[in-house]
Amino acid sequence: NPYNKEVYDCKRLTHQEILAVLSRYTSTFEDKSCNSFVQWCLKRKVNFLQAAVSRKRVDSQNKKIG
């Protein structure tokens, strides 16, 4: 479950970082630039492009809050 906050943390990644992760699993974007990847995502309305930013901060007892 990707919404399980005890297992997953949301991270703010650049398009280049996302493309780097994808390139480990597929050759679809092998010879493509980051801009080509972004255009491909926009045409397909990939959700991470519209994702809200979530910030977490840690209190003095190292518990996640917010």
Image (cartoon, helix red, strand yellow):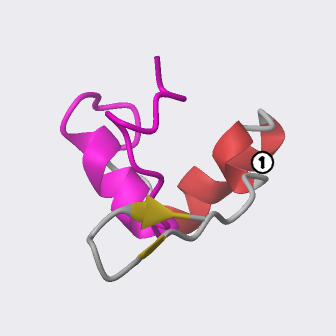
Q: Which residue is mark 1?
A: 42
Instruction: Say which element carries label 1.
Output: helix
| Residue farthest bottom in this picture | 60
Towards the viewer: 40 or 54: 54
> Does residue 13 belong to the magenta stretch?
yes
**In this view, 25 is above or below 59:** above
Residue 8 in the figure: left or right of residue 26: right
Q: Nearer the viewer, residue 64 or 29?
A: 64
| Quadrant hosting residue 54 | bottom right
Q: Is residue 30 visible?
A: no
Q: What is the count of numbered marks?
A: 1
Q: Residue furthest top?
A: 1
The residue drawn where x is 48% and y is 26% is 2
Can you say whether 17 is above or below 1 in the image? below
> Camera-side residue: 49 or 19?
49
Residue 25 position, x and y percent, is: 23, 29
Q: Main secondary structure of the magenta part?
A: loop
Task: Tell me where the magenta segment starts and ends, as one range.
Answer: 1-30
Instruction: Tell me the kind of residue under disc 1.
Output: Leu
Please say whether residue 29 is one of the residues in the magenta stretch: yes
- Identify which residue is drawn at 28% across, 55% down: 20
The crowd level at tag 1 (other Cα within 10 Å; few <14, some 14-19, many 20+) is few
Residue appearing at x 57%, y 70% in the figure: 55
Q: Does the rendering let one see residue 10? A: yes
Where does the image place residue 12, in percent across and percent down from the top left?
49, 67
